[in-house]
Amino acid sequence: MNNLIEIQSQIEKLQKQAGEIKAREFDKTVLEILAKMKAFGITLKDLQPGKLRGAKTKLKTATANKSNIAKIRRKGERSAVVVAAKFRGPNGETWSGRGLTPRWLALLLTQGRSKEEFAIKN
């Protein structure tokens, strides 16, 4: 099984097997879901976005935790201050002049252009 054609053949075979298993188990899974819906009195309306009761926060928590971690501030940390752009690139890119020089400006500087050419005049 060293050559690419053999591996691709096995991938196709495995994908076909996976499809067959999914097709066999689909009806069984739907019946299980319907039984649980009946047992708990769940309707299709209950499953619409924004209609979930207690599960709503649990579902959101899984995806929101990643983004919220970045937003958590340490004690005494100041919130970010928005600074007006001081430089504008040829394609409309902007830079406040703080932090690392952006790639678009660094590339132009290596081509012999000056930073002042891109300064935004008030």
Image (tube, rainbow, N blue to C red):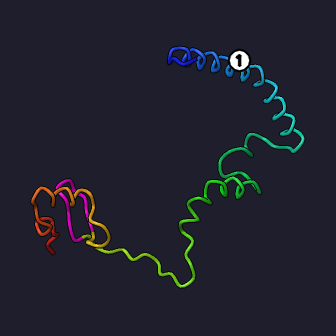
Let me know if residue 93 is in the magenta part: yes
Q: Main secondary structure of the magenta part?
A: loop
Tell me residue 35's x, y (percent): 87, 35
Q: Position of residue 71 (x, y in %)?
A: 54, 68
Q: Residue at x 74, y 46 (%)?
A: 46
Q: In terms of depth relative to the viewer, which is nearer, 76 or 101? A: 101
At a point 90% along the width and 41% down the height, the residue shown is 39
The stretch of residues the image draws in magenta is 86-95
Depth order, front residue of 32/115? 115
Q: Residue furthest front?
A: 2
Residue 49's x, y, as percent? 65, 48
For residue 58, above or below residue 116: above
> Toward which corner of the image does residue 42 lie, by quadrant?
top right
Q: What residue sits 57% from the left and 82% below the top?
A: 75
Q: How many marks?
A: 1
Q: Answer with left or right where residue 80 lies relative to residue 116.
A: right
Tell whether 36 sits left or right of 18. Answer: right
Which one is in front, 4 or 68?
4
- The vertical placement of 12 against 102, above or below, is above
* Quadrant where the image shows the C terminus: bottom left
The secondary element bearing badge 1 is classed as helix
Q: In the displayed structure, does residue 100 sit left or right of residue 13?
A: left
The answer to which quarter of the image holds residue 86 is bottom left
Q: Position of residue 6 (x, y in %)?
A: 55, 14
Residue at (77%, 57%) from the top-left corner? 54
Q: Residue furthest right?
A: 39
Return the residue at label 1: 20
Q: Quadrant of the N terminus?
A: top right
Q: Amino acid at mark 1?
A: Glu
Depth order, front residue of 66/2: 2
